[in-house]
């Protein structure tokens, strides 16, 4: 009798404990209504891993997003520092350890990381349709709804959109090169003033060059084509090796990171740099890093235009909270603040024509950039991000056929 | 009581040093054979084959070895010269402060400092420009991210020399080299003979193990070659980290192969050095 009672007691305790085990996350949030999500998100903490390399972005997050989220939704936003590789390493580690309760709820990623996270199934979703503010986003825009030639399918939510641009000092370089043929002449006339960073930005540059070699801005569109890649990459490595003696340090080494190129550009060591966010010119001129005569432009054949996104991790412990935060970040209010010229000066990812009149007017009133080019100016020369396999191969082959040669 | 203390020490050593190391090494070993790893598909020798056929690891070992050897050799030589030449000067409070100050500077700060001073857009390049010695930044000699790893070696010297100066000053005092030198002089030895036959052999013999350990330390240096090195060849730690964080996740295991090889080589070398009793007993 006693034994049976004990057995029942143990069974009851186990059942109780099992039902207590994180009741919030036992819910299937994909089926829940937005009202339920909002209720659940109230008075919770969301852990957000993001790149913290820009003081202006940090200022936006710390002094606008955090207090507004607290005030409006009673959510505490915790920021931890980490970008692409760190996020992927963390997710891989947690997957490996079979961790069901992740350290991070949401992440700020681009196509490169999205590709990696999808490979290890590190993201939770689809969720974008759940967000009320996603109605203002045009998911049919190929630069938004398609990331690295693959549909996002609601697994990540667009947060910003920007274009890769070339950066030069209009006083030192009145006529910068806009084609590979012009670049060849440029490096011969100005030896040591051009280089390719061995990172994401440099590889994006090489993709733009490869598109030019293909003969058209959309030459790399569609699925990865090994034969096309082999032909074009052979031409590209031949072009670089032929001209590298006129590059920075006579092409014997290449800078590890793009940020170093910006420093070298500001000190006058190189004459041409490049980067996403339309070259990041406005921010760097206002910071005093670049001279006021700095200008940006797109390559004649085009430069890559892409979006950056917010994702929810597969093992997020607060998925409802993460959805609420992401919904806030794509709200007209938060995107307007993000676009302010005195602040982040970022392009809104929203389709302005879909917004309520009140916000339409506000977005239209935003003053133009003083130094950097606007997305509209460059959009004529925008090309889509090619399939991720191009990036994989370029990374590997740039090292094999150029750096180590 | 003493025995008990010994036991606790041993347990702590196992728990905090041996166990984590063994687990990490086991993890890397399994990863290198593809047995674990989110994108791996099971046991394979392909990662080992790839690493050994590509030759990158071998080149990196050689490159790191040469840089570490040159760095240690120059630091030790400089420290010996300074101690033998200026030993009295260290009684001066200010001079000793200047010499010891770099000991407090972390490697990463030192590397940035070297970059700011010696880059083609750095302090010395700007000074040379102001003095009309050069007309463009490119004319300034290539001292960072360069082919000869000059920037890395300069930084290693700045980090190691103060330590060796401190060490040799102590050896000089403890081994009573001053008295031995006086004795040699009394027996008719000249300055050169005293330095080469008395002071240097004692100091080197007493510091031999530390010199080797510092060589191993430099072999695995990370921040300094990361900031001041070139993209190819790269020093070992930079190479291994690069492989571990590469874009193609299917090749992450190659980084673990390199980490395993590096650990085995360094552990073997360390065990070999410490198992030679004679050296250990003579060491400082």
Image (cartoon, rainbow, N blue to C red):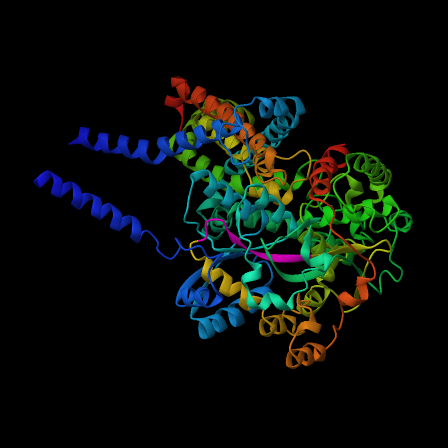
A11 vs A348: above or below: above
Residue A159 screen position, x and y as percent: 62, 62
A185 vs A77: above or below: above
The answer to whether residue A195 is visible is no
Q: How many marks?
A: 0
Is B238 left, or right, of A71 in this rendering?
right
B61 vs A284: above or below: above
The residue under the point 79% across, 41% down is A251
Residue A57 screen position, x and y as percent: 59, 65
Quadrant position of the C terminus of chain A in the picture: top right
Residue B205 screen position, x and y as percent: 45, 24
Q: Which residues are magenta?
A: A307-316
Residue sitting nearer the eye, A349 or A164: A349
| Magenta-colored stretch includes residue B221 | no
| Magenta-colored stretch includes residue A315 | yes
Residue sitting nearer the eye, A131 or B113: A131
Q: Quadrant of residue A389?
A: top right
């Amino acid at each position: 009798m006693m034994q049976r009672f004990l057995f029942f007691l143990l069974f009851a305790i186990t059942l109780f404990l099992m039902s207590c085990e994180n009741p919030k996350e036992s819910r299937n949030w994909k089926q829940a209504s937005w009202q339920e999500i909002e209720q659940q998100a109230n008075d919770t903490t969301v852990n957000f891993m993001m790149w913290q390399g820009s003081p202006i972005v940090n200022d936006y997050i710390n002094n606008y997003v955090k207090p507004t989220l607290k005030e409006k939704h009673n959510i505490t936003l915790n920021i931890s520092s980490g970008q692409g590789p760190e996020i992927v390493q963390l997710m891989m580690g947690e997957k490996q350890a079979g961790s069901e309760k992740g350290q991070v709820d949401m992440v700020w990623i681009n196509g490169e990381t999205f590709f990696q996270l999808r490979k290890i199934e590190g993201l939770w979703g689809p969720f974008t349709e759940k967000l009320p503010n996603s109605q203002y986003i045009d998911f049919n825009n190929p630069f938004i709804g398609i990331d690295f030639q693959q549909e996002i399918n609601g697994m990540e939510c667009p947060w910003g959109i920007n274009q890769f641009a070339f950066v030069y000092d209009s006083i030192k370089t009145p006529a910068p090169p806009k084609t590979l043929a012009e670049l060849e002449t440029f490096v011969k006339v100005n030896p040591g003033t051009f280089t390719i960073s061995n990172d994401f930005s440099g590889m994006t540059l090489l993709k733009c060059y490869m598109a030019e070699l293909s003969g058209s801005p959309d030459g790399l569109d569609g699925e990865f084509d090994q034969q096309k890649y082999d032909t074009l990459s052979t031409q590209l490595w031949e072009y670089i090796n032929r001209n590298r003696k006129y590059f920075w340090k006579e092409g014997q080494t290449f800078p590890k990171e793009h940020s170093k190129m910006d420093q070298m550009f500001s000190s006058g060591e190189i004459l041409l740099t490049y980067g996403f966010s339309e070259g990041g010119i406005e921010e760097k001129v206002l910071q005093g890093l670049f001279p006021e005569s700095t200008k940006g432009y797109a390559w004649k054949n085009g430069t890559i235009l892409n979006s950056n996104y917010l994702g929810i991790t597969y093992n997020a412990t607060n998925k409802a909270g993460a959805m609420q935060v992401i919904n806030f970040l794509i709200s007209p209010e938060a995107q307007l603040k993000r676009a302010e010229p005195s602040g982040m000066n970022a392009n809104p990812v929203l389709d302005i024509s879909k917004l309520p009149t009140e916000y339409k007017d506000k977005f239209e009133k935003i003053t133009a950039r003083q130094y950097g080019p606007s997305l509209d100016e460059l959009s004529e020369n925008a090309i889509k991000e090619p399939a991720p396999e191009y990036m994989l191969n370029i990374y590997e082959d740039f090292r094999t056929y150029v750096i180590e040669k | 009581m003493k025995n008990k203390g010994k036991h606790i020490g041993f347990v702590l050593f196992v728990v905090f040093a041996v166990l984590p190391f063994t687990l990490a090494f086991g993890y890397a070993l399994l990863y290198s054979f593809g047995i674990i790893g989110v994108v791996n598909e099971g046991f394979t020798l392909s990662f080992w084959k790839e690493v050994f056929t590509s030759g990158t690891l071998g080149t990196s070992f050689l490159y790191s070895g040469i840089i570490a050897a040159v760095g240690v050799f120059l630091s030790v030589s400089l420290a010996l010269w300074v101690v033998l030449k200026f030993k009295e000067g260290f009684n001066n409070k200010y001079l000793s402060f200047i010499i010891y100050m770099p000991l407090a500077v972390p490697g990463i700060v030192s590397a940035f400092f070297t970059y700011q001073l010696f880059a083609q857009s750095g302090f010395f390049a700007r000074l040379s420009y102001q003095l009309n010695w050069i007309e463009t930044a490119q004319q300034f000699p290539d001292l960072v991210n360069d082919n000869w790893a000059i920037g890395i070696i300069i930084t290693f010297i700045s980090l190691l020399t103060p330590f060796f100066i401190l060490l040799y000053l102590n050896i000089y005092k403890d081994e009573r080299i001053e008295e031995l030198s006086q004795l040699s002089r009394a027996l008719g030895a000249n300055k050169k003979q005293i330095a080469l036959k008395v002071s240097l052999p004692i100091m080197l013999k007493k510091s031999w193990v530390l010199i080797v350990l510092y060589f191993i330390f430099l072999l695995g240096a990370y921040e300094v070659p990361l900031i001041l090195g070139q993209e190819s060849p790269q020093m070992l730690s930079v190479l291994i980290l690069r492989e571990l964080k590469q874009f193609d996740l299917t090749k992450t295991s190659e980084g673990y192969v390199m980490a395993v090889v590096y650990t085995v080589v360094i552990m073997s070398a360390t065990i070999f050095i410490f198992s030679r009793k004679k050296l250990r007993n003579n060491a400082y």
